[in-house]
C-alpha cells in the first residue's frame, strides 16, 4: 500500500512537470528564456529554455507529497536545488560568468555539508587499505559535485541526451544499490525521473513546440545525482561502494575528462564551449541526432553494466578502480584522435575552398566598376560565409 501511494506521487510529479511546460512555453519569450541559434548552437529558430524549471516544479510538488519519506539531508537538497535552478535560469537569461557560477555552486555545496554533515569521508577499501580522507573530504566533495554538475551541462548538446543519461544513471544506482529498502534519496531520484519524462517528450517535439533543458535543468540533474551518489556510497548499510559510483555516471565523466584534456593541451580554458564533445564527433561522422542519442544511451548503459559485472566478479575496489581508469584512458585517447582527424579534414576542406575562390576571383572582375576594390571586397567577404565547419547547414535541426 505504501508503494502504491508513492507511485501516485510520481504520477503527480510527472503531470505537474507537463503542465508547467505548457505554461512556461508561452511565457519564455517574455522572460527572455529562449535559446538563439549561432555558430555553435545549430538549431532552427528560438527555442524556450524551460525544461529545467518544469522538472523542478514536478520534483517540488512530488516532494511535498512525499515529505514523510525525507529527512534533513533530502530537505536540504530540495532547498539548495532551488538556489541552483534559479542560478541556472539567470545564466540562461544573462549568460553569467564561469567565476560567478562556480562561486555560487561552491557556497551551496558547503551549505549542505555544514547543515547535514554529509560529505565524502572514505573512498572505501582499496587494495586492502581503508582510504579515509579526513578534512580533505570536504574540498573533494565540492570538486565532485561541481564536476558532475558541469559534466551534465556539457552533455546537454543534442536533444534528449542529458535527460536520457540521467535516467541511465538512476537505473544504474538502483542496480548497484541492490535490494536496499526504500530510502529518501531513492524516492527523490524516482521523483526526478518521473518529472523528467514530460521534458523528454517535449524536447523530442512530441508535445507541441520543442523546448530545451537549459542550464537550470542540467545543473539540477547533475547536482541531485552527485549528492545521491555521495550519500548512498557513504552509508554503511548501502551496497553502493565509492568506486561503484563512478560507473553510474561513467559517460559524462569520461567525456568531461576528454574535453578538458584536449582544451588544456590546446592552451584553451577548460570551460570554453566548443563542438568537441562525443555527440559532436558522432554527428561529424554523418550520424543523425537521434541515432547519436541512441548510440550514446546504449554506451552509457553498457558502461554501467560492465562496472556492475566487474564489481560482482572482482570483489575488489582496487581492481574495480583500475578497470575504470583504464576504460577512461581508452575513451580519452580514442575520442581525442577522432577529434583531431575531423579537425584536420575540416581544415583541408577550408583550404581547398579558399583556393577555389582565389582561382575564381579573376573571372568575376569583368564589369567596369570592378577593379582592385571589387577584388578586395570578395576576399574579405568570403570567410564569413562558412561558419558551421564540418557540420554545415544540413545539421541545423540539432541543439549545439
Image (spheres, rainbow, N blue to C red):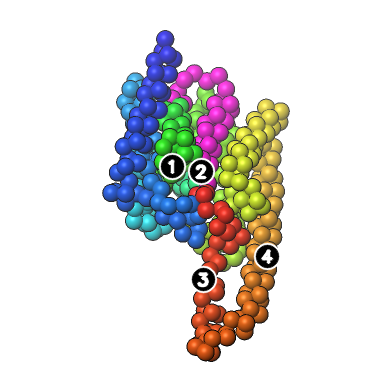
Work out which residue is located at the far left of the displayed protein and give it. Answer: 30
Q: Earlier in the sequence, mark 3 or mark 1?
A: 1
Q: Position of residue 200 (x, y in %)?
A: 47, 36
Tell me the quarter of the image containing the N terminus.
top left
Which portion, as a residue range, is magenta?
158-187
Mark sitting on residue 70 = none
257 within the magenta span: no
Q: Earlier in the sequence, mark 2 or mark 3?
A: 2
Residue 91: in sight, yes or no?
yes
**Camera-side residue of 230 and 86:** 86
**For residue 198, side relative to residue 362 (left or right):** left
Disc 2 vs disc 1: Cβ atoms closer than 8 Å? yes
What separation in Å lies between label 1 and label 4 (alpha carbons)?
A: 34 Å
Circle 3 SS class: helix
Q: Earlier in the sequence, mark 2 or mark 1?
A: 2
Residue at 50%, 46% in the rendered image: 156
**For residue 6, side relative to residue 318 (left or right):** left
Mark sitting on residue 384 = 3
According to the image, label 2 marks what residue?
Answer: 159
What separation in Å lies between label 4 and label 2 (alpha carbons)?
A: 27 Å
According to the image, label 4 marks what residue?
Answer: 344
Amino acid at each position: 500500500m505504501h508503494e502504491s501511494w508513492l507511485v501516485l506521487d510520481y504520477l503527480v510529479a510527472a503531470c505537474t512537470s507537463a503542465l508547467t511546460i505548457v505554461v512556461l512555453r508561452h511565457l519564455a519569450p517574455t522572460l527572455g528564456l529562449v535559446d538563439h541559434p549561432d555558430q555553435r548552437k545549430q538549431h532552427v529558430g528560438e527555442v524556450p529554455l524551460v525544461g529545467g524549471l518544469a522538472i523542478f516544479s514536478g520534483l517540488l510538488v512530488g516532494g511535498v507529497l512525499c515529505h514523510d519519506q525525507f529527512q534533513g539531508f533530502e530537505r536540504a537538497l530540495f532547498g539548495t536545488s532551488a538556489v541552483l535552478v534559479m542560478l541556472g535560469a539567470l545564466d540562461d537569461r544573462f549568460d553569467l560568468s564561469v567565476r560567478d557560477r562556480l562561486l555560487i555552486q561552491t557556497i551551496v555545496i558547503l551549505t549542505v555539508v555544514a547543515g547535514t554533515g554529509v560529505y565524502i569521508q572514505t573512498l572505501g577499501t582499496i587494495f586492502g587499505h581503508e582510504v579515509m580522507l579526513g578534512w580533505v573530504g570536504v574540498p573533494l566533495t565540492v570538486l565532485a559535485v561541481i564536476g558532475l554538475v558541469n559534466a551534465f551541462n556539457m552533455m546537454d548538446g543534442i536533444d534528449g541526451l542529458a535527460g536520457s543519461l540521467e535516467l541511465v544513471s538512476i537505473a544504474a544506482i538502483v542496480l548497484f544499490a541492490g535490494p536496499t529498502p526504500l530510502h529518501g534519496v531513492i524516492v527523490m531520484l524516482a521523483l526526478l525521473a518521473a518529472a523528467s519524462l514530460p521534458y523528454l517528450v517535449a524536447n523530442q517535439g512530441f508535445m507541441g513546440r520543442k523546448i530545451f533543458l537549459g542550464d537550470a535543468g542540467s545543473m539540477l540533474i547533475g547536482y541531485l545525482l552527485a549528492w545521491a551518489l555521495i550519500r548512498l556510497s557513504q552509508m554503511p548499510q548501502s551496497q553502493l561502494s565509492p568506486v561503484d559510483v563512478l560507473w553510474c555516471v561513467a559517460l559524462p565523466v569520461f567525456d568531461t575528462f576528454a574535453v578538458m584534456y584536449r582544451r588544456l593541451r590546446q592552451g584553451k580554458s577548460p570551460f570554453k564551449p566548443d563542438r568537441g564533445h562525443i555527440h559532436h564527433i558522432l554527428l561529424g561522422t554523418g550520424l543523425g541526432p537521434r541515432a547519436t542519442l541512441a548510440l550514446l544511451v546504449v554506451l552509457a548503459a553498457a558502461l554501467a553494466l560492465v562496472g556492475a559485472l566487474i564489481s560482482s566478479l572482482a570483489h575488489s575496489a582496487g581492481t574495480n578502480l583500475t578497470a575504470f581508469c583504464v576504460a577512461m584512458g581508452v575513451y580519452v585517447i580514442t575520442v581525442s584522435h577522432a577529434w583531431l582527424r575531423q579537425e584536420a579534414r575540416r581544415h583541408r576542406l577550408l583550404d581547398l575552398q579558399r583556393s577555389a575562390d582565389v582561382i575564381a576571383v579573376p573571372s568575376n572582375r569583368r564589369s567596369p566598376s570592378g577593379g582592385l576594390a571589387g577584388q578586395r571586397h570578395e576576399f574579405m567577404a568570403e570567410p564569413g560565409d562558412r561558419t558551421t565547419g564540418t557540420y554545415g547547414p544540413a545539421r541545423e535541426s540539432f541543439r549545439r
